Image (cartoon, rainbow, N blue to C red):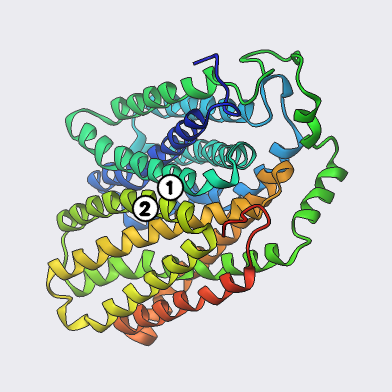
Amino acid sequence: MTGATLAESRALRLATLAVLYAAQGLPWGFVAGTLLAYLNDRGLELRTIGDLSAAVMLPWTLKFLWGPVIDRFSLRAMGRRRPWILLAQSAMILTLLALASLDSPAGSLGAVAAILCIHNAFIALQDVATDSLAIETLGADERGIANGLMSAGHYVGVLAGGAGLTWLLSKSDLATVLLAQAAALAVVMLLPALVRERPGDRLLGVRPAERDQAIDDGEVRSWKELWRAIAAGFSHRSAWIGAGLALAIYFAQGVLIVAAPGLLFQDLGWTVVGYAELSTYLVFAAIAGALGGGALATAFGRRRAVAAGTVALGLSWVSFAAASSHWSDPTVITAFAVVTSAVQAAMVAALYGLYMDLSLPRVAASQFALFMALLNLSRTVGTSTAADLVAGLGYAGTYAALGALQIGCAPLLALLGPPSREPSA
């Protein structure tokens, strides 16, 4: 393994990126699934659990702040992005061990929130560093399949962290679950620990080895140079259209994060068991969709794949609204949800590849993270307006309106034009 580098081996590039994304999905599934099940089982109030969840998610809202730091500073002897990934994974493991050392997590929510907030800050660091590594090492013809594999890896991690660790919790205790998660992350860490980015990099050390001078051409040597490079990255029309697209394309997802459970539990009388079973189906559908989206993006180009995905997603929501008289049938709900999950995952896989095309490699961490921040803002605005939309339009009207909005994102992709590094699009 130490004889090959990410720059030299396509298989190694794809495998490393997919595994690193699985490592990000694992703690996400743990927090959203296993930890919430643990706290609910101990009778904590819903508002308390909600406040804890908000604190834990805060670092993801601010993750774009990592971008300039990663672009500006590097330990060049070990590679431009790899040291940041190793730092992030080490900190993720240490914070899990700190959490496992608490005698009574349910009775120490302040400490739990603080530790998990730090934990998620380092997951966000790994996310930004991994994305920038992908932009720098992947060829334009690899970005479609790579983003499909990365998205699928994320969903596999979510499944393991949610359903897998919840099962382990039912057989043991929270400390055991945390130690198992730390052990899994330690195994994942072997890849970035044993694989170099480029020829001439050292596995460990601070003294640079001999390397081709061209490797250092993309290094940012001052803050002034960094801000100029970021400004250059947003100096063309496609970057601004891409930013506008980011502000619109996740809005519907944000609304449905709140509206969909409300429909199922409050209007249709679903139980937690039924919802958990549906969630498992949706993860498997998302894995298949992500892989399919990556393949479609490779075959037809990211721009076309995103356009097809957003139209298909919008049509699925409009169709769901039209079938409101059949919502009492769980089979109908499950069928629509599975299809929507697969289509959404396919679109997201292609969308990430598109934003990689729009990001300059030398400031990839900063520019790509800013695009992702706009996507998160779009989703957050949707979440905050969900209750008002449902109150005004009802559930069927909300799904129909969101479907129309999603379809309306497609013309922005036509205005975007072929990305400069994707001649096949």
Residue denoted by label 2: 292
Q: Quadrant of residue 187?
A: top left
Taking depth in this image into account, of 90 and 281 the one nearest to the observer is 281
Q: Amino acid at mark 1?
A: Gly
Whichever of callouts 2 and 1 sits on the residue coming sooner in the sequence is 1
Residue 199 picture location, percent across and down: 66, 20
Above or below, comparing residue 369 to residue 257 in the picture: above
Q: Could you say whether the residue bearing mark 2 is in a helix, strand or loop?
A: helix
Counting other residues with Cα less than 10 Å from the Cα at mark 2, is it few (<14), some (14-19), or many (20 or more)?
many
**Residue shown at the point (42%, 42%) measured from the top left:** 149
Confirm or deny contact between disc 2 and disc 1 (CB under 8 A).
yes
Residue 229 picture location, percent across and down: 80, 49
Residue 310 picture location, percent across and down: 44, 69
Q: Specify the quadrant that holds the C terminus.
A: bottom right
Q: Amino acid at mark 2?
A: Gly
Label at residue 148: 1
Q: How many numbered dots are placed on residues in this image?
A: 2
**Residue shown at the point (31%, 46%) measured from the top left:** 33
Q: Going by the image, does 360 lie left or right of 277?
A: right
